[in-house]
Image (cartoon, rainbow, N blue to C red):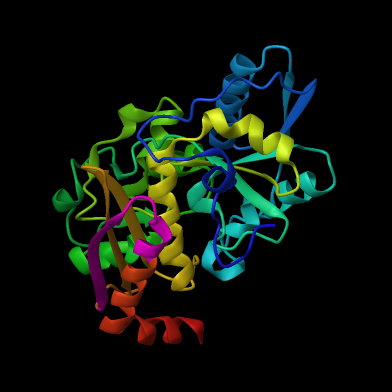
Amino acid sequence: MLECAEDRLFIYKKFRHKISGKTVNQTPHPGPARLVIASRESALAMWQAEHIRDRLRALYPQTEVSILGMTTQGDQILDVTLSKIGGKGLFVKELETALEDGRADLAVHSLKDVPMNLPEGFVLAAIGEREDPHDAFVSNKHENLAALPAGSVVGTSSLRRESQLRARFPHLKIEPLRGNVQTRLRKLDEGQYAAIILAAAGLKRLGLGSRIRALISSEDSLPAVGQGALGIECRADRADVIALLQPLHHPDTGACVLAERALSRALGGSCQVPLGGFAEVKNGKLRMRGFVASPDGKRMMQSEMSGDIAHPEALGNKIADALRAQGADVILAELAL
């Protein structure tokens, strides 16, 4: 059974003997007669579910793989920021209910939307190879953030992005931006914002990469924990499903995401906390950076370390300790009030 203290993948315990940059090679399982994937119904979520569906169909051609589209509470409430209505867990709760009652066998998530502590009885069975993890600057009139005139309105739904923008560009006006990718682009095109900040991965997956005016470097805007990676969740007692999903797991991405999620979990990361964490595999080691900031960006704690790829959570926890030593606890306590 999965422990809430970590989300160690089953693949790390049962199906893998050595981490490498290659997808796990296994003898294909014959596959069940039918698999159902639970997914949100937004265009991006459906792209992600269809991508995993197609991978599974190729692996198990005799298996009927279908998608159960669902509207989550997070999709329904669009007039309030996520940090005020319960966070990104609102995007996954209904999907987990479908797994629990047997309507679906697995669920596909953007990992940046998955709470740091999964409910008891659920597991991340596989993590797919990461798409571009960077934030993207999108504007119809300006080339990049530095080109925006004072007072320009920039839209973002993320306290992480907001705190970094306020720290680097205090002359800009940051306003909330909710809705799916198409809705956010429409609001930009209507002139409600001079620019908006979105995840590059989502734009590229939807064939909207041409809307990106500039990628924001990770030095200037540290990505969200899990940004650009897909997580496949199932019930912890579904050993059959876990085994079927192992060919979809990307070990390097998995190690990076486990380190990032350990950092966020150790600091109580949520939509209420301006926090970023980003790990990369460099020369066989994990290199990771993390930060915690006040929402106004005036106080920011940062840390960077390298660690053993075989023990990613240890690295994430070490960076969390370093941030706490710098005073992150003060910010976290203030945000909890």
- The one of 135 and 79 positioned closer to us in this rendering: 135
Residue depicted at x 56% and y 48%: 13
- Indicate whether 172 appears above or below 246: below
Residue depicted at x 62% and y 52%: 91
- The one of 118 and 227 positioned closer to us in this rendering: 118
- Asked which quadrant contains residue 332, the reply is bottom left
Q: Position of residue 312 (x, y in %)?
A: 39, 56
| Res. 269 in view | no
Residue depicted at x 76% and y 47%: 237
Task: Work out which residue is located at the far top of the displayed protein and give it.
Answer: 61
- Indicate whether 19 appears above or below 220: above
Q: Position of residue 302 (x, y in %)?
A: 24, 70
Say how many tags the image has.
Answer: 0
Residue depicted at x 57% and y 67%: 5
Which residues lie in the magenta part? 299-316
**Is 178 placed left or right of 286 in the picture?**
right
Task: Work out which residue is located at the far front of the displayed protein and give it.
Answer: 17
Magenta stretch encompasses residue 281: no
Identify the image quadrant of the N terminus. Answer: bottom right
**Is 258 placed left or right of 115 in the picture?**
left
Q: Position of residue 19 (x, y in %)?
A: 40, 41
Magenta stretch encompasses residue 305: yes
- Indicate whether 63 appears above or below 232: above
| Res. 61 in view | yes
Task: Work out which residue is located at the far left of the displayed protein and give it.
Answer: 147
Q: Position of residue 33 (x, y in %)?
A: 80, 20
